[in-house]
Amino acid sequence: MRFSLFIITVFLFSCNKQDVHPVEIIGHAGNGLKNPSSIYHANSLEAVELALGTAGVLGVEIDLQLSADNELWLLHDRKLETETTGSGCISEATFETLKKVRFKTVNKERLVRLSDLNFGLYSGKTLYLDIRHYNGCTEALIDQSRIIDALHPIIEAWGTVHFIVTTNHKPWLNGFAAQGWTVYSDIESMSEFQELQHYNLNFHGIMIRNSAAGKDDVTRIQSENKKVILFDIRAPKPIRQALKKHPEGILVDDIKAALIEKSS
C-alpha cells in the first residue's frame, strides 16, 4: 500500500513538474551561435546534428542566405571572410565557389546548403529557418519569390520535419504564409507586435529577445493565439527567467545548461 502511494506521489509530482515548464529547448544556429564550449561552428552540419541528437532538444534555428544561383546556405555573418575561408557575400557567389568554403575552426567544417542537411534523421523535430532578406554586401533587397522557389522543394519533400520560416522583414510575412507555411515574425519590441496586429499581417508566432518581453507580454501574445519564442539567452540566470515566462520555446546558445535548468 505504501509503495502504491509512493508511485502515485511520484507520478503526480512529475506531471506537475512538466506543467511548470512545458517549454521547447531550441538550439541557436545548431549548437549555439556564441558558445565557446561548443566543439562545432555555428550553422555547420555537425552543430545541427549534435543539437538535434541531444535528448530533450526538439528543434534548432539556422540562418539562411540565398546564393546567386538560388541555393540556400547556412551562415549568420554578412560576409564570408568574417569566420570562413571565403570572401564576399553568399548572395553574390555560386555553388562552385561556396562548396570549397570552410569555417576557420579546428574542425574546419564546410559551409553547407539547406539541401545538404540529413532531413531523414530529423523526423519529429522542428527547424526554424531564419531567412536573410538582403544582400550582405550591397544591402539590396532580395526577391522573395526566389526564396520561396528555393524553399518549396525541401519543405514539400520532408513532411516528417516541422519547418517554421522566420523573418524580421514584415513585408514578407504574408507571402510566406500564403504558401501554407508556418511563419514567425522576428521583432525587437512589443510595439512591433502592435504594428503587426494593426496591419493585419499573417503570421503564427513571434520571436523576441528575452529582455524585451516580460511574462505579461508573453501571455498577451499567446492570448492572440500566437506562439512565443524567446531568444538572446546565453547563461543559466536568463534561462531561468525565460522559463518562468512560459513561452512555447527558448532559443539558447547552451542547450545543456537549458536542459538542466528546465529539469530543476
Image: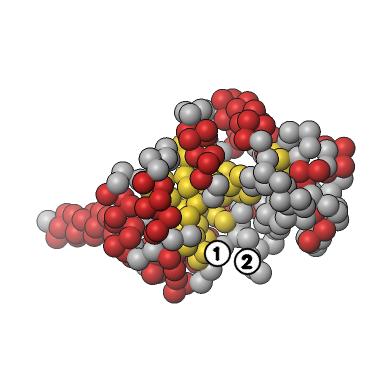
Q: How far apart are marks 1 and 2 (CA)?
A: 6 Å
124 or 249: nearer the viewer: 249
Among the 4 quarters of the image, the one containing residue 19: bottom left
206 sits to left or right of 8: right
Q: Is residue 61 left or right of residue 89?
A: left
Q: Which residue lies furthest to the bottom in this view?
A: 237
- Name which of mark 1 and mark 2 comes first in the sequence: 2
Along the horizontal axis of the image, is 124 left or right of 70? left
For label 2, the crowd category at 10 Å Cα-Cα, with few meaning under 14, some 14 to 19 and many 20 or more, is some
Q: What element carries label 2?
A: loop
Q: Position of residue 23 (x, y in %)?
A: 38, 54
Q: Residue at x 42, y 37 (%)?
A: 202
* 1 and 2 marks in contact (CB < 8 Å): yes
- Left or right of 1? Residue 26 is right
24 to 155, vertically: above or below: below
Q: What element carries label 1?
A: loop
| Residue at point 71%, 57% (across, down) | 77
Near-viewer residue (103 or 55)? 103
Instruction: Identify which amino acid the numbered label 1 is placed on.
Output: Asp
Q: Which residue is drawn at 73% across and 55% down?
A: 78
Q: Name the residue under label 2.
A: 35
The answer to whether any part of residue 99 appears in the image is no
What percent of the width, then of the height, locates residue 54? Answer: 54, 52
Check disc 1: other Cα within 10 Å, few if <14, some if 14-19, many if 20+: many
Q: Residue 185: give x, y in percent of width and height.
A: 48, 47
Under mark 2, the amino acid is Asn
Judging by the rendered image, the residue that carries numbered circle 1 is 254
Question: Residue 87: which quarter of the image?
Answer: bottom right
Is 29 rendered above or below residue 153? below
Quadrant of the rendering where the N terminus is positioned:
bottom left
